Amino acid sequence: MVSLIENIINCQTRNWFKEGELASLLRKGELDQEYSVQVANFFTDVPLRAIVEFLERHGLSVEDLREYYRKHIKDVYPNRDLEEFLG
């Protein structure tokens, strides 16, 4: 079964990016250019509640997400609601 997050992040692309692969990138702090659209979609289009559930499901912390967002996303695709959550 495809997750809500996979449906959202892949809606504009042809190459499918799995939720577990996204978690791995976040954990490593890396940005794979092949999946940059999906990563941007995650930070801009996925509802905050789904992001929190994603973090819990994959053993990621808010700090992991904050660091990744600040390093790779914030300057290009800012999300004010997410920034408020991340503090």
Image (spheres, grey):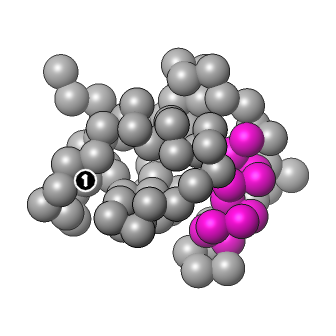
Q: Nearer the viewer, residue 24 or 53?
A: 24
Q: Residue at x 44, y 42 (%)?
A: 22
Q: Please tell me whether the stretch drawn in magenta is mainly helix, strand or loop.
A: helix
In this view, 15 is above or below 23: below
Q: Residue at x 50, y 36 (%)?
A: 23
**Residue 41 seen anywhere in this rendered image of the structure:** no
Query: Residue tagged by mark 1?
Result: 10
Residue 49 quadrant:
top right
Q: Residue at x 29, y 30 (%)?
A: 3
Q: Residue at x 76, y 53 (%)?
A: 67
- Report whether 84 appears left or right of 14: right
Residue 7 percent location from the top left of the image: 25, 43
Give the tally of numbered discs: 1
Give the quadrant of the N terminus. Answer: top left
Amino acid tagged 1: Asn
Query: Is the residue marked by circle 1 packed among few (<14), some (14-19), or many (20+) residues within 10 Å?
Result: some
In this view, 59 is above or below 43: above
Task: Report the residue that reaches farthest toward the left.
Answer: 14
Magenta residues, as a range?
64-74
Residue 63 percent location from the top left of the image: 80, 41
- Report whether 49 appears left or right of 14: right
Residue 21 on the magenta segment:
no
In this view, 5 is above or below 77: above
- Report whether 59 appears left or right of 22: right
Residue 69 on the magenta segment:
yes
In this view, 22 is above or below 31: above
Residue 57 percent location from the top left of the image: 53, 19
**Residue 26 seen anywhere in this rendered image of the structure:** yes
Task: Report the residue that reaches farthest toward the bottom.
Answer: 76
Residue 68 percent location from the top left of the image: 68, 54
- Report whether 3 appears left or right of 46: left
